């Protein structure tokens, strides 16, 4: 988890170094991030289903090995196109890891300790988001962008050895159910179309051909995907998981929380480099409060799970996150002090940590052990859908008012060289993006509250049996 989560944040601060090295366009630079998240999101759902078929331990080990090898290859990439392709391979490995981690924890821990275990898991992911930007920034500043990827290799090798020694082979780990290839292809079509439309809108214009084509693909493929899943005996997305109102609300609010908050680290890191001229290491230091807030709040939330409802804790987490985003929308300027910036970023992190543990625990204890792979796959898929849409939407809003040369400079972290008018346009785009993200948390609070006072726990008794 430490390794896979760090890969979503190390490049957030090192992206300007990559963009400058390859002299990449704004679109090519953004796809270095989006390729990883898009492939990861699509395959998380597929691997959640596959884990129930071939076994969680086996898929976990394959994923960790793939991520390690791909990380080494990323550091050898000769151009931005090859790097983007290899980032997709990295994402394949990361998806196999992420899909299996929560399900294995749920199998291994009794119900009274599950909240604490999941809280620690969130804390590890949060620690990775602290380590990722700092190490990514330090390595990019000192040894270049290739070191950002090579850092993963010794960690991955150590993780593989440790996993083979410690992960047990559960009885009846896999089934003979077939894999839904058609569903996987349709999920690629609708999510890929959505991401293309959102990510390219700011660069090419919202009425450009690729944007319209992407939006049309999403509109056509999404309902077909749902219809196909309803008719499949063994679907990629088990729609029965949404039959319970509480679980459905937990899934949707999970997606909205991450849609609102995920791009914050990237946006803040890009802003302080573009507006203040900081290097990647300086940017990495300044975005620590997001992950630090998550680290502080997630174990605390884990202890509260047994005494308070997921409805209350999750809704409160969305509210705290929204307060931090609103502060950024109203107060962010090139002259904003580091202390004030840390306060707003810290609130985003605290709110996320307060939300994650109770919401995840509510989902995972509401299904039978045999369905936890797909249940967690759906949770991770919706979470990662929030990730990729957050980045695509935010970057589209931030850069939509900038001319082509300023977009390139913004991604390269050198926009401050172009003058105050350029910074004013960039800052206005940031304010608008943060207002939109804050509004999404308000919608998320409404969805979270709609789950009702108590969520059905049809699989809760099986947690102890899984031991």
Image (cartoon, rainbow, N blue to C red):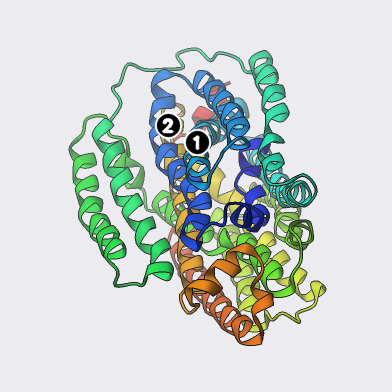
Question: Judging from the image, what secondary structure is the residue with disc 1 in?
Answer: helix
Label 2: how many Cα within 10 Å (few below 14, some 14–19, many 20+): many
Q: Is residue 385 above or below residue 175?
A: below
Residue that label 1 marks: 95
Q: Is residue 201 left or right of 226 when viewed as pictured?
A: right
Q: Position of residue 117 (x, y in %)?
A: 67, 37
Question: Judging from the image, what secondary structure is the residue with disc 2 in?
Answer: helix
Q: Is residue 270 left or right of 288 when viewed as pictured?
A: left
- Determine whether label 1 and label 2 are within 8 Å by CB: yes
Residue that label 2 marks: 47
- The image quadrant of residue 323 is bottom right
Q: Nearer the viewer, residue 15 or 397?
A: 15
Residue 179 visible at all: yes
Q: Position of residue 234 (x, y in %)?
A: 26, 29
Which residue is located at x 74 percent, y 73 percent? 276
| Total numbered labels | 2
Q: Which mark is residue 75?
A: none
Mark 1 and mark 2 lie on one chain; the one further toward the N terminus is: 2
Q: Is residue 21 left or right of 282 when viewed as pictured?
A: left
Residue 438 visible at all: no
User: Which quadrant of the rendered structure holds the C terminus?
Assistant: top right
Label 1: how many Cα within 10 Å (few below 14, some 14–19, many 20+): many
Q: Is residue 8 left or right of 183 when viewed as pictured?
A: right
Q: Position of residue 333 (x, y in %)?
A: 69, 81
- The image quadrant of residue 410 is bottom right
Q: CA distance from mark 1 to mark 2?
A: 7 Å
User: Which quadrant of the rendered structure holds the N terminus?
Assistant: top right
């Amino acid at each position: 988890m430490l390794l896979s989560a760090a890969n979503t944040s190390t490049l957030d601060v090192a992206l300007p170094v990559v963009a400058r090295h390859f002299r990449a366009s704004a679109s090519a630079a953004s796809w270095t991030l989006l390729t990883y998240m898009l492939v990861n999101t699509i395959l998380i759902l597929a691997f959640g289903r596959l884990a129930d078929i071939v076994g969680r331990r086996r898929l976990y080990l394959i994923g960790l090995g793939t991520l390690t090898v791909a990380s080494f290859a990323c550091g050898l990439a000769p151009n931005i196109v090859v790097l983007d392709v290899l980032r997709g391979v990295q994402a394949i490995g990361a998806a196999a890891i992420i899909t299996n981690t929560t399900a294995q924890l749920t199998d291994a821990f009794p119900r009274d300790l599950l909240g604490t275990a999941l809280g620690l898991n969130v804390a590890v992911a949060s620690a990775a988001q602290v380590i990722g930007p700092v190490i990514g920034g330090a390595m990019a500043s000192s040894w270049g962008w290739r070191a950002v990827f090579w850092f993963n290799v010794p960690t991955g090798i150590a993780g593989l050895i440790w996993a083979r020694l410690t992960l047990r082979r559960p009885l009846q780990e896999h089934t003979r159910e077939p894999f839904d290839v058609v569903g996987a292809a349709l999920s690629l079509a609708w999510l890929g179309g959505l991401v293309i439309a959102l990510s390219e809108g700011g660069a090419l214009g919202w009425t450009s051909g690729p944007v319209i084509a992407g939006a049309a693909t999403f509109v056509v493929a999404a309902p077909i995907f749902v219809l196909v899943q309803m008719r499949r005996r063994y679907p990629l997305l088990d729609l029965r998981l949404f039959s319970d109102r509480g679980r459905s609300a937990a899934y949707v609010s999970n997606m909205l929380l991450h849609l609102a908050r995920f791009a914050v680290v990237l946006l803040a890191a890009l802003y302080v480099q573009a507006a203040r001229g900081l290097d990647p290491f300086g940017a990495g230091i300044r975005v620590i409060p997001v992950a630090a807030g998550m680290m502080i709040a997630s174990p605390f939330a884990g202890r509260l799970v047994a005494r308070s409802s997921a409805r209350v804790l999750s809704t409160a987490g969305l509210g705290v996150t929204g307060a931090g985003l609103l502060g950024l929308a109203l107060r962010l300027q090139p002259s904003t002090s580091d202390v004030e910036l840390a306060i707003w970023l810290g609130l985003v992190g605290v709110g996320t940590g307060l939300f994650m543990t109770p919401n995840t625990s509510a989902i995972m204890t509401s299904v039978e052990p045999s369905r936890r792979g797909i249940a967690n796959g759906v949770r991770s898929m919706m979470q990662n859908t929030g990730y990729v849409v957050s980045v695509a939407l935010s970057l589209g809003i931030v850069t939509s008012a900038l001319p082509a040369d300023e977009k390139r400079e913004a991604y390269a972290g050198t926009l401050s060289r172009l003058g105050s008018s350029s910074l004013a346009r960039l800052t206005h785009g940031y304010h608008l993006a943060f207002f939109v993200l804050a509004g999404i948390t308000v919608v998320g609070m409404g969805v979270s509250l709609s789950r009702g006072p108590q969520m059905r726990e049809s699989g809760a008794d099986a947690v102890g049996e899984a031991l």
